[in-house]
Image (spheres, rainbow, N blue to C red):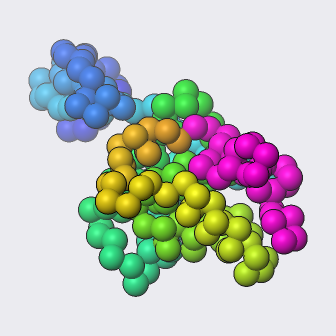
């Protein structure tokens, strides 16, 4: 690690601690050349693999921006979006994968967004799952109604975010199968009338 003050190439680690969020390590360093001290933060890089095969670093801001579009005109605050972004990133990091397919990012967004705002969820899901007709919306609304908590019960946003599993979302078909494949027949799109 280069010293940020004198650019000396050899610095010494004085102390290492896990950051409060548990996703990074904070290191206190010293430069033997200029004797100044500085702090570095190291985090595991989470990489998104796009459909084209290209890779890019996961960006919480990019994920939140996509959700923000779905939330336009809805009573969703920036703080709620920031928390959703944090939950999505935690779920992806918790998967243990260093490289996450872009599809999994969308799946990780669906659960927390559904708990946050059902209308925004439908908007996001309609683009993410490529709804082609009103029937697609009706089918998803039927799933939402069937799985809605009893009247007066508050959704548990923490467990909703924690239940995001890689490769599945909250959708359930009539035969009991879950995830995107329950709605798509395995191709990411819903069958006509389904």
Residue 191: x and y in percent read 86, 64
Residue 77 visible in the snapshot: yes
* Magenta: main secondary structure: loop
Quadrant containing the N terminus in the rendered view: top left
Residue 28 occupies which quadrant of the picture? Answer: top left
* Residue at x-position 12% and y-position 29%: 36
Q: Quadrant of residue 189?
A: bottom right
Where does the image place residue 173, in percent across and percent down from the top left? 74, 51
Q: How many marks?
A: 0
Q: Is residue 73 above or below residue 194?
A: below
Residue 11 shown left or right of residue 50 in the figure: left
Query: In this orientation, which residue lies closer to the viewer: 157 or 3?
Result: 157
Q: Is residue 183 magenta?
A: yes
The residue under the point 65% across, 52% down is 171
Residue 41, percent from left and from top: 30, 33
Is residue 9 or residue 52 the one in the foreground? 52
Residue 121 x/y as whole percent: 53, 66
Q: Which residues are magenta?
A: 165-194
Residue lying at 84% horizontally and 71% vertically, measured from the top left: 193
Q: Residue furthest front?
A: 151
For this view, does 82 lie left or right of residue 148? Answer: left
Direction from residue 148 to residue 83 in the image, left or right: left
**Picture quarter with the C terminus:** bottom right
Residue at x 44%, y 38% (from the top left corner)? 162
**Residue lying at the far bottom of the rendered structure:** 73
Figure quadrant of residue 39 = top left
Q: Is residue 2 visible?
A: no
Q: Is 65 included in the stretch rendered in magenta?
A: no
Comparing 175 with 191, the one in front is 175
């Amino acid at each position: 690690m280069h010293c940020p003050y004198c650019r000396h190439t050899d610095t010494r680690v004085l102390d290492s601690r896990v950051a409060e969020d548990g996703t990074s390590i904070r290191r206190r360093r010293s430069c033997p050349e200029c004797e100044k001290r500085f702090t570095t933060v190291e985090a595991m890089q989470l990489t998104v693999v796009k459909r084209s095969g290209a890779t890019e670093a996961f960006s919480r801001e990019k994920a939140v921006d996509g959700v923000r579009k779905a939330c336009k005109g809805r009573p969703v605050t920036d703080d709620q979006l920031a928390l959703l972004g944090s939950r999505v990133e935690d779920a992806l990091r918790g998967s243990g994968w260093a490289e996450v397919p872009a599809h999994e990012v969308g799946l990780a967004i669906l659960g927390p967004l559904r708990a946050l705002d059902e209308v925004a969820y439908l908007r996001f899901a309609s683009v993410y799952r490529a709804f082609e007709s009103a029937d697609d919306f009706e089918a998803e609304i039927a799933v939402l109604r069937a799985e809605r908590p009893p009247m007066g019960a508050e959704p548990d946003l923490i467990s909703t975010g924690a239940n995001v599993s890689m490769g599945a979302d909250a959708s359930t078909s009539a035969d009991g199968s879950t995830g995107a494949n329950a709605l798509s027949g395995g191709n990411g799109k819903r069958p006509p009338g389904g």
